[in-house]
Structures are given as C-alpha cells and as structure tokens.
Image (tube, helix red, strand yellow):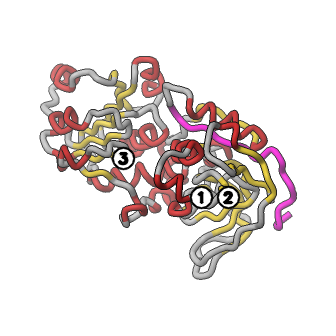
Amino acid sequence: MFAVQFDRHGPASVLSLAEREMPAVPAGCVLVHVRAAGVSPVDVALRAGGTPVAASLHLPHITGIDAAGVVVGIGAGLSDVTLGDEVFGTVLLTEFGGAAAEYAVLALWGAKPAAWSWAEAGAAGSAVETATRALDLLDIVPGAVVIVEGAAGGVGSMAAQLAAARGARVFGTARQESLHIVASLPGITPVRAGDDWSDTFGPLGIHRADAALDASGAGVLGALVEATGSAHTVVTIADPTAAEHGVRLTRGVLAGESTGNHGLRSLAALAERTGVRVLLRGSFPFGEAAAAHAAAEVRPRWGKVALVNDQPRASPLG
C-alpha cells in the first residue's frame, strides 16, 4: 500500500509517498480503505521534531491520526460493524500515526455523516473525540453559558457546536481576522479573543459563565477562572500551565483517561439533526502531502486540513 511518511524530522518537505506493508487488524479495531486523512497540529509537531514523543518515533514513520474510509477488515470481538461501512475516526493514539495511507487501522470510529464529504470526515476524528471528552468533564447541561476559547480551530469549532447541541448558550472566541469564521457557526456568539468577559456578559445580563473550555493555549486560563468563578469549571486541552491555575488539562488516552468515542458513534445522527459540520481549511491530494502540512502551519490557524486519496486502487471489496 502507499503511505505518507517521513524518514527524518524537519520541514514539510521531508514527507514522501512510499510503499509500505499492509497493517494487521488488532482486536477491537477496523481496517479501512482510506478515502481521506486529516493533517492535525499533532501530525505537524511530530514531523517537525523537537519533542520527546517525536524523538521516540520509529522512522520511517507514517503520519496522520485521523482518517475516513470504507471498512475492509474487522478485528476480533466486534459485532457492531460490517464490511463496506463508511466510517471516520482515529488510529490508536499511542501509535501517533498511520492514518495517511491507502489503508489504516482505526481504534475509535463512528459512521460517516451522510452530509459530510470524505475530506471533512477524514479530518474530524480527533477533533470530535477531544471535544466530546472535554465537554463531558465540564458536565454541560441545557441552558448553561459556555465559553470556548479558540472556537475557529479544529477542536474549538467542533466543541462549540457540540456544546450548542447539548443545549448550551455558547460564546466562542477567535482573533479579529478569524472572527467571521466563528460567526458562521449556527448558534455560536462570536467574541474577539482578549475582550473582557465582564464587558461581554454585562449588557446581556449574564453574571458569569457556567463552564469554559480552552482550546487555544493562549494563556487565558486566569481570565476563564475569573469568568466562571471557579477553576473547577474550566478545562484546557492546550495549556501546560493548567495546574498552576487549578484547572484540568485533559490528554485522553495518553493520560489514561476515558475517551470521547461515544461522540464519534453518535455524530452521524447528531449531524443530521443539528447540522454540525467541519470547518475545512483546505484539502490536498495524498501526493501533495508536503503542501498540506505547509498549509496547516500557516497562521492564523483555523479549521482543518485534509489529504484526499488521489491514487485510488481497487479495494478488497471491489
């Protein structure tokens, strides 16, 4: 099978398309004929190097943690999936890659929403899982006032929509140049990043927010604790200084936490009912993986970038 890989760390130009062995299908997982794969900030950081995780990778490394495709293999112990199902999801996250390939093993997945393109579905898996996990920690209830910092990003935009789908009144922040992106999300009130929350809430008769999710890592935890009145009502996915503020930092399976897989499993029905969508910044053929990674690094970052299978070969299902 073909796969996007790098044999050394560095800029996007280190990526290449190579032939690799077909992966085995572990128990509890599915093998998919990939139609699209995402390019996440994690993928970019691992390729660039400079972190302990990147240094631990066995090279050459197949990049990508998100993918969507057609199920062509089913691991032992599964009874709720059939060959030919169209799904989206993530690889086993402790493997840190393997999705940007002709075939990929998904450890977490759900049915592909009918209204989503393959590119949208391919880029969405980890965003849906992370957003679901963070919102579960915040125990969002109908009518709650919720802040989502970084609501133009891949996880932030998904979290804002999922919180609104749970009945929350959502305020999503973004930089001035990306504020129109947040404004395009139905039911989300856009707020310029850095604005004082008392100035935002006061005219609306809101005393304070009930919960806040930081998806930006932009040093906003102190302001969010003040806006909600408690560190226990704030969760971050991106700020390593969380403990200094008494805030929870969620890292998922990497920290032994429960996953947000139920968000993936229920997303197709939710998308049909509410119109939850993926903010897709751009899509590129697999053969242009370097350009896709370069695009994912352009600031300000917003939405998701996807790789689309531009070298279709017959799958085992025909």
- Picture layout, residue 41 above or below residue 60: above
The residue pinned by badge 3 equals: 237
Q: Quadrant of residue 162?
A: top left
Look at discs 2 and 3 and give the one toward the viewer: 3
Q: Tell me which numbered mark, 2 or 3, is placed earlier along the sequence.
A: 2
> Given the image, on which type of amino acid does mark 1 rest?
Ala
Give residue 285's position: percent from left, percent from top.
Answer: 76, 40
Q: Residue at x 27, y 39 (%)?
A: 146
Look at discs 3 and 1 and give the one toward the viewer: 3
The region drawn magenta spans 302-318
Give residue 17's position: percent from left, percent from top.
Answer: 78, 48
Query: Does the magenta run of residues contain 312?
Result: yes
Q: Residue at x 57, y 42 (%)?
A: 48
Q: For mark 3, give the secondary structure.
A: loop
In three-dimensional space, the C-alpha distance between marks 1 and 2, rounded to whole angstroms, equals 6 Å
Query: Does the magenta run of residues contain 188?
Result: no
Position of 196 with respect to 148 (left or right) is left
> Given the image, on which type of amino acid does mark 2 rest?
Glu
Q: Residue at x 75, y 37 (%)?
A: 288
Query: In which quadrant is the N terminus drawn?
Result: bottom right
Give residue 226's position: percent from left, percent from top.
Answer: 15, 35
Say if mark 1 contacts mark 2, CB within 8 Å. yes
- Picture layout, residue 214 above or below residue 269: above
The residue pinned by badge 1 equals: 111
> Given the image, on which type of amino acid does mark 3 rest?
Ile
Q: For mark 2, give the secondary structure.
A: strand
Other-residue count near label 2 (Cα within 10 Å), few / some / many at <14 / 14–19 / ≥20: many
Q: Quadrant of residue 314?
A: bottom right
| Residue 110 in view of the camera | no
The residue pinned by badge 2 equals: 86
